[in-house]
Amino acid sequence: MEIQILDAGTLNGFDVEVDVLVVGLGAAGAASALGAREVGAETLVVERAGGGGGTSAMSGGVIYLGGGTALQKACGFDDSPEEMLKYLRASVGAGRDEAKLELYCEGSVEHFDWLVAQGVPYKETYYYGQSGEPPTDDGLVWSGSENVAPFRELAIPAPRGHVAAVPGAAGHKVMSTLCEAVEASGAKTKFNTICTALYRERDGRITGARVETFGESHTISARGGVIITTGGFILNDEMLDAYRPEARKCSMRVAADGDDGSGIRLGMAAGAGTRHLDKVSVSLPVTQPWDLKAGLLVNAQGQRFINEDAYYGRLGDNALLRQDGRCWLIVDDTFYVKPDYGFELAAVGETPKELEEELGLPEGTLQSTIEVFNLHAKRGVDPLFGKREPFLTPLTTAPFGAIDCTTENARYAVFTLGGLATDVDGRILDPDGRVLPGLYGAGRSTSGLAIDGYSSGLSLGDGTFFGRRAGRTAGAR
Amino acid sequence: MEIQILDAGTLNGFDVEVDVLVVGLGAAGAASALGAREVGAETLVVERAGGGGGTSAMSGGVIYLGGGTALQKACGFDDSPEEMLKYLRASVGAGRDEAKLELYCEGSVEHFDWLVAQGVPYKETYYYGQSGEPPTDDGLVWSGSENVAPFRELAIPAPRGHVAAVPGAAGHKVMSTLCEAVEASGAKTKFNTICTALYRERDGRITGARVETFGESHTISARGGVIITTGGFILNDEMLDAYRPEARKCSMRVAADGDDGSGIRLGMAAGAGTRHLDKVSVSLPVTQPWDLKAGLLVNAQGQRFINEDAYYGRLGDNALLRQDGRCWLIVDDTFYVKPDYGFELAAVGETPKELEEELGLPEGTLQSTIEVFNLHAKRGVDPLFGKREPFLTPLTTAPFGAIDCTTENARYAVFTLGGLATDVDGRILDPDGRVLPGLYGAGRSTSGLAIDGYSSGLSLGDGTFFGRRAGRTAGAR
């Protein structure tokens, strides 16, 4: 989809006038519309698909919240905004947005209540043993690396994955609920409608947009502002080549059809700044069931490179971006189980040496990796990467196996994290950090909380949290 | 420095009118001005410093050229555009610009002749044993990883570092010559002058700029176009936080005062697309003299991670970005010499085990790394990373040492590589890849040939090559 910036001065008035125009109806768009309606703004949401939901509806529906939410309390977990902030500061990567992180942690309890008030159902039960959404309808899960090295030492761990009460992936439930709330709020929605251009005044202010529905074009004035919530760009190969070419090697792009970066390109063409367009979330869900965390993830030199008990979003980032997607999970017969997601064995051997040969690894490499791991695991420690019990089983029982985690053969699930620069109220910023008048954004069209080392639920989390704020800000104008 | 996009419609004519306005007088700016003059355009160059040169003048002055230049031939080296292209394709990283690479390799012989015609002096002698500029006034050096794994197998190696005939760093010689050529060409130059704003017509076209000299403001119309050649953004901490925070850990930022990204921000504010803003060149010159390439560069887990005979720009990228700047070069007594650039020993030990303990590495890690390396080195191979003779000495002779290569204590020299998106004629492109009328760019304000795994001379190379093309294109309008 091509985008344009047009001269508002060439128009004789707009076809439609609203206070707030929201472009895209995923989680961020729904929250933006609800926020705008909270302050009484006349609100129109346009969505290119035939209905609301977007990539959010296809997701696991995990929302990363904490600080002592009602759900955390009901499940018996203590948490505080301070500990949540410590974890996020330590885990989201360099170049983080301190102001957004602080506000998000402070407002997380209230934000959970707001989601419940919109009608999102949560069962007050905790599920152990699954990274991300559980197979059941339980409400609370671990969805990050809170209780593994090095984060366990840096912040008191608590599970913060809040999952709507349906078995398995719950994104559709979150989104059907939020879309109903949008309809009930009095916001208007228009589907099968894409935004192809923004209208700009001579002073740079954005005052409206051009949208297209089944080949027909309309102009819409947005007195308060246009809010871009069109998602990321994982389906746009040209943009991936420009910002993160390695993502193209991943077998699974987590995306609804609309994730072609149109909103990011609209913002950039209007003069917006960007942040972290090279950043992606890469999941490598090979340690599912968790028994497999006892395995050793080794690279093409037979070396370990991460604590394998880390959340699979951390495994994926490291495997793809630091090891070029060339790695294998080494297992022995005591803990091997077939992985949940269809990973295959690349090689089997009666000894580490035989497995090393089968994999074509240089002589001595995998053998010494296993020896060094076993030496320490017998003492109950992993001084290389800090992996913890119960995953410190020395690998001694034949046969040994290597689960294929190469990008050619394994499941790597990827989506983009970077986007337009925004302030905490969803205002889009120019390259100097000044407000670009009339333009707002939220969700994966913008740079949010997570940069590196993803924890699941941060995208639905920051999309709804800062989307709602963007809606309120634009709507209050 | 803050930048702005202003409405050209508010002006009653410009103070000064030229055909081409070049912003910045480094290598790219000089070549742009010369290119514009070649087609007869009235040309003004503004430079914020008191004289021309920029970061190019502070550099080693290596220019990466090949394909069979007069200098390569005089020194007895065969090369062809095809082999040069093979090497660059393999080494510059994913997301490369094929069209630019092809044109550069095809035009490289002619470009060398052009540099000579401008007056840049080259001595027709070859110097062996130095990565980058030699201590002598010799003309040709290895300045990349052409003759090491994996590139040696992918393209016929040839030295392609062309260095002007002065001892040591030659950037000042290249730039004094090019600046004289600019003056002789009839282009006007104005120093102590910064460009703070671009003027935009209602249709988006850039038609001029506002510049400031000692607090006085002038407007300049550029009928053919404005060419941005203001360098990268390694001195702008906010931009580094947004695009490559790790670069802030480097002890040495390779930059003249002006490298604050002002030109990139001007372009972005005008609606330009960008490419690879996260990419940096990081040099870790620890293997100088080359004897030290026999050492083993190990990370915080005592593991090797690269063939140590690679060019120090590759060592730096990998050390900083994949190993978080935590590594040491392990040496033994047979080949240890003091590194040229002031690296210090972090630890010494009579045995690998003792050195491992001194460094605080996990038990068994460094020991097995040395054992595995020695096992293969005795056979004359390095199956892990493909390091070659004469650097495959088994490490057996006490004492053993560890040269400190951590970011805290070692010399990491960094500059940015990404920038505005341009076509092969220097036209700046919007986020959809369409020409942004009136705006041109070259050098490190733009994304050029190198993305990852730098070879020295590519920045002066693409800056002058595509700068000249930008000047000709803008000047011909």
Image: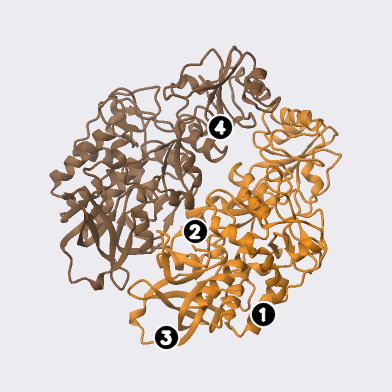
Chain colours: A brown, B orange
Q: Chain of mark 2?
A: B
Percent across and percent down for residue A217 are: 21, 59
Q: Which residue is mark 1?
A: B181
In the image, what residue type sits under mark 1?
A: Ala
Q: Chain of mark 3?
A: B
Determine the CA span between mark 4 and mark 1: 55 Å
Percent across and percent down for residue B93 are: 58, 49
Percent across and percent down for residue B345 are: 76, 44
Classify residue B345 as left or right of residue A467.
right
Q: Which residue is mark 3?
A: B14
Name the front one of labels 2 and 1.
1
Task: Give the number of the disc on residue B239.
Answer: 2
10 Å crowding of disc 2: few (<14), some (14-19), many (20+)? many
Picture residue at 45% right of the left edge, 48% below the top: A240
In the image, what residue type sits under mark 4?
A: Ile
Mark closest to the chain's N terminus, 3 or 1 = 3
Are the residues flagged by discs 3 and 1 from a single subunit? yes
Q: Chain of mark 4?
A: A
Are the residues flagged by discs 4 and 2 from a single subunit? no
Count how many numbered circles sit on residues in the image.
4
Q: Which residue is mark 4?
A: A306
SS assignment at label 2: helix
10 Å crowding of disc 1: few (<14), some (14-19), many (20+)? many
